[in-house]
Image (spheres, helix red, strand yellow):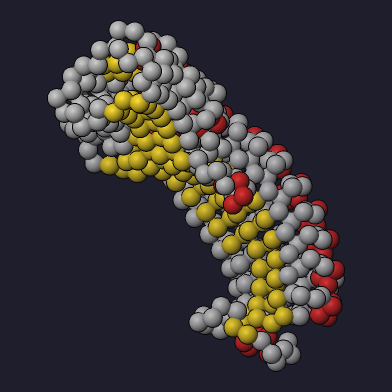
Amino acid sequence: MTPHLEKLDLGGCVDFVELHMPVECLDLKILTLKVTKAGNLNLGMTPNLEMLDLDACNEFELHMPVECPKLIYLKIRGSKVSNLNLELTPNLETLDLSKCYCLLKIHAPVGCLKKFAHFSLDTHSNFKSFQVHEWYNSAELYSIAKSYIKAECIHICPLHPNNKLPNFGFDCETDEPGYSWMGNIEKLIYSGLCPCKNLEYWSATICGLQHLRGLSVDGSIPEDLWQLESLEKLSLNMVEIRHLPDSICVLKHLKSLEISNCLLIEQLPEEICRLECLEELYLWSCTSLRDIPNSICKLKWLKYLRVVGCDKVEKLPEKLGCLKYLEKLELGRCKSLQGIPNSICKMKCLKRLDLSSCDQVENLPEEIGCLECLKELNIFSEGISRLRLPQSIFQLKGVRITGSREQLESYGFTSFTESYPGSLNFYAVEL
């Protein structure tokens, strides 16, 4: 009887039970039924609906027999929905499934949600939180979109409280556009519905996310990591292995690899040169690592190389100068490092060289003055430094040299400033 109605708000009508809709309501764009006793709604009768709010409709079951091409906002928090076909909502931007205790399956084929930006699912599953937020300015702030997945042990499975097996809860967060990975949301949600599933099952599920671009792993590496064909950033922390699996070397789109606190790892694979897109390689506190493979010099797009706190690394590849696009070389706290190869003088893009607490390094290459782009040189040492600065370095202009007060005075500098105000014995001089 209201053929031109565009907005209907029945929110808070706690005794409202049923909406009679015998014919199509072609003009209805916004419908709010939150906190009502409404039990069902046939979206086939509202083909132009853009926003649907069913928050706290505890008795509600959603029927979606046909495509809803204009629906952009769907909130069914607390409903009885068990199956949801997101292929029928190609323009959906926001989806809230919080407290949907009956949810069993979400169908979302690859590429079906190209505008998806906001997704919420909470503690009815073993996900403590699961959120997707698209930051429209992220491309200006980060070179690689951020994804975050973390597993931790929980005590009780909310669906199977009597199960004594090890259980895991997951925190997941990403600022990637939804379309880049939502094709696998069915696998991810199914895995998340019950924490009784073991970590091996979770790892297999992760490796099925073929559009995942960022992954952080604590403790163990999924065996089928090579399946993550789109992976651009990989972070491994506290992984108890002696050698990296060769499967990492086939990740041809990988741009950033971080290996931190992996105390047992002794060497990197020679095949690391196959990571032809790699731009950043970070090695933090890998205290058993002994050397850097020569093949690293074939990573022609490498911009940042950080080998920090790797106590047993004694030398660097002699052909390091092949890394002609390298901008930052950081070797802090590599206490066994014996020297720097002369070939670094060929790295014309090098802007930062960090040798802090590399107490065994006595000489820098004589031709270091050829590094015209060099802006930062950190030679700080906590003890007595034996490092000699070549005369060519004084030819450079605009270089900031950081060290202890005693070091800088031993090189003849008389005017310097605190490098980090309030810090102990960190000083800098500008050439």
Residue 385 makes an appearance in the image: no
Q: Residue at x 77, y 47 (%)?
A: 300
Residue 62 makes an appearance in the image: yes
Q: Residue at x 71, y 50 (%)?
A: 302
Q: Residue furthest top?
A: 22
Residue 83, by quadrant, is: top left
Q: Position of residue 36 (x, y in %)?
A: 20, 26
Residue 21, by quadrant, is: top left
Out of 136 and 287, give the one closest to the viewer. 136
Q: Residue at x 32, y 16 (%)?
A: 2
Relative to 153, residue 408 above or below: below
Relative to 288, residue 244 above or below: above
Q: Residue furthest bottom?
A: 414
Relative to residue 232, is residue 30 drawn left or right? left
User: Which part of the image, by quadrant, shows the C terminus?
Assistant: bottom right
Out of 239 and 138, give the one closest to the viewer. 138
Residue 58, by quadrant, is: top left
